[in-house]
């Protein structure tokens, strides 16, 4: 991943982002062309702290034959993204750009055993069912044994040993306070949910920029004189 220094995310923030998203694009190379599938996943770690990403695919997915436990795959995880118009800056001579958050996890992938797959199914569903509280979580035990076994035979569980973590959180961190806050205001007023999400991330990333601009605004205001 190409990441200019101002946008580079550290390891902890990148892993936290990927774990919170829990959905990405798994990509592998079959010798002639890239093969990819969008899928949900969850992160865990080995005893030595090495991150692992666990997921499953349909048994007939071409990725199954590529999970040899040696060849590196890419798991690309994207968040909100939005277009930026040059007209939204205070400074002149700006250009259009795109703001986004993205993390790439890279490492070899192997197939899970039947017991590991059963645990993967329950852990993955628990991750996302937990977001629906107070709804009572769905459990695989609610399925009949025959139906559950048939479903398990139709998929293949996989685990990536994450050897490389790359993160790019492009929120225009390199811009001046005036341009940064002006852009933030423009994005926050858009009807697009991603634009508003990026605006929230910008405000959280540089709270002092908004404080500085507020102070400048107060200093330029002409106080009213009493008569």
Image (cartoon, rainbow, N blue to C red):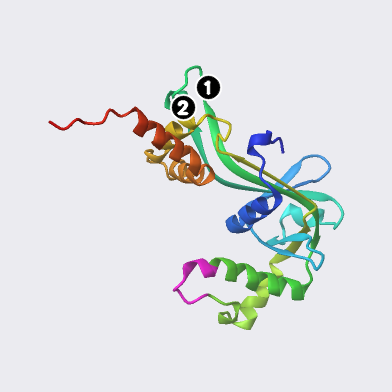
Residue ID at (53%, 22%): 95
For the residue labelled by badge 1, is the local secondary structure a helix, a strand or a loop? loop
In the visual, does 16 lie left or right of 129?
right
- Mark 1–mark 2 Cα distance, whole angstroms, equals 7 Å
Residue ID at (52%, 75%): 137
In the visual, does 157 lie left or right of 197?
right
Provide the residue span drawn in magenta: 129-137
Image position, residue 63 (x, y; %):
75, 53
> What residue is disc 1 on?
95
- Residue sitting nearer the eye, 78 or 67: 78
Q: Is residue 107 visible?
A: yes
Give the label on residue 85, or none. 2
- Residue sitting nearer the eye, 16 or 30: 16
Q: Is residue 38 visible?
A: no
Mark 1 crowdedness (10 Å alpha carbons): few <14, some 14-19, many ≥20:
few
Image position, residue 198 (x, y; %):
49, 42
């Amino acid at each position: 991943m190409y990441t200019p220094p101002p946008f580079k995310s550290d390891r902890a923030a990148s892993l936290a982002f990927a774990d919170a998203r829990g959905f990405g694009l798994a990509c592998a190379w079959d010798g002639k062309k890239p093969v990819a599938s969008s899928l949900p996943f969850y992160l865990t770690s080995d005893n030595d702290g090495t991150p692992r990403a666990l997921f499953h695919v349909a048994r007939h997915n071409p990725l199954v034959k590529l999970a040899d436990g040696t060849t590196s795959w890419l798991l690309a995880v994207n968040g909100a993204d939005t277009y930026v118009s040059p007209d939204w800056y205070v400074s002149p001579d700006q250009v259009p750009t795109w703001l986004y958050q993205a993390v790439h996890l890279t490492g070899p992938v192997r197939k899970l055993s039947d017991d590991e797959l059963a645990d993967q199914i329950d852990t993955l569903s628990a991750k996302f069912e937990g977001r629906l509280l107070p709804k009572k979580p769905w459990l695989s035990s609610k399925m009949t044994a025959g139906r559950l076994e048939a479903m398990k035979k139709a998929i293949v569980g996989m685990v990536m040993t994450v050897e490389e973590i790359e993160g790019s959180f492009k929120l225009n961190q390199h811009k001046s306070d005036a341009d940064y806050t002006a852009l933030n205001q423009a994005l926050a007023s858009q009807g697009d949910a991603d634009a508003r999400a990026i605006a929230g991330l910008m405000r959280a990333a540089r709270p002092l920029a908004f404080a500085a601009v507020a102070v400048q605004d107060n200093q330029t205001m002409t106080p009213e004189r009493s008569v």
